[in-house]
Image (tube, rainbow, N blue to C red):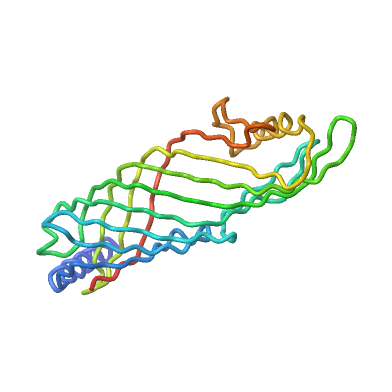
Amino acid sequence: MKYIFTLLCVSAFSLICNAQKSRPVKANEIAFLATDLIDGTFQFKYERLISDHFSVDLGIGYKGTQGLVKLSGLDTDKIKTSDITYSGIKLVPEGRYYLNNIRQTGMIGFYIGAYVKYSGFNSDLDGIYINDSGTTFELEFEAKIGVTSVGLMVGYKLPISKRFAVDFLIAGPGAGFYNFSLDNKKDLPDEFYDDFNEALEKYSLFDFLEGDFRFSQVKRKSDLRLPSFRYSISLTYAF
């Protein structure tokens, strides 16, 4: 077994070396982010070589309401809503520094870099609200969510053929700035917002929110800052 494992490792290393040697140097690449499909996002990227070690790229994606990641709705004694779904766009400009000379090898190997990520989403929140006197009100909200994240990243791009490679974004820690707004389509009593904020505090997704994250009859907007983290696996094509 040890012999077979060693043979497989040597064979894999040989294939990678041969792919690097035979890989033509191209100044452009397009990529499809496979891991973004988990949350229903189709994202493509374009990367351009600009110097011996530097490249820039731009990712553009669209998130649909479908995806493997589901957010359950609010379910308290007073507020009950449908599951939370959202859709919108993503824009991700990046700058990368490759450790090897990419004018000689192409845009492969280890890299470090920085990114800015903007996401703009729309969501509908429907349900019912029951006040202290037992009166039932319909909920019909339109929500807008804007997220701007900045951070650093480290990754490795593995060549698998003359033009194809797999890009592993290993880690991308950063900070995210979130903006939320609610547009109410139905008339609601003033006390709804106190009960709504209390429900959000009990909602697992909002356990880490600061105390100033609150909605009110007058102010239906709120914002907060949270740590962010990126990772991805992409299939790239050089041309």
Instruction: Tell whether 36 sits left or right of 115.
Output: right
Placement of 119 over or under 5, stated as above or below? above
Camera-nearest residue between 15 and 189? 189
What percent of the width, then of the height, locates residue 36? 45, 59
Q: Residue at x 76, y 33 (%)?
A: 192
- Viewer-nearest residue: 68 or 150: 150
> Which residue is painted at 45% across and 38% down in the image?
177
Q: Residue reaching furthest front?
A: 218
Residue 79 placement: quadrant = top right
Q: Is residue 30 left or right of residue 70?
A: left
Is residue 91 rendered to the left or right of residue 1?
Answer: right
Q: Where does the N terminus fall, quadrant-wise?
A: bottom left
Is 95 situated above or below 180?
A: below
* Residue 74 placement (x, y as % from top left): 71, 42
- Residue furthest toward the top? 211
Location of residue 108 in the rendering, given as x and y in whole percent from the top left corner: 20, 61
Report the residue at 54% width, 27% height from top.
210
Q: Is residue 49 above or below residue 239?
A: above
Figure quadrant of residue 44:
bottom left
Q: Is residue 224 left or right of residue 1?
A: right
Towards the viewer: 227 or 168: 227
Relative to residue 129, is residue 163 depicted above or below?
Answer: below
Q: Quadrant of the C terminus?
A: bottom left
Which x, y percent locates residue 133? 90, 31
> For residue 17, which quarter of the picture?
bottom left
**Disc count in the image?**
0
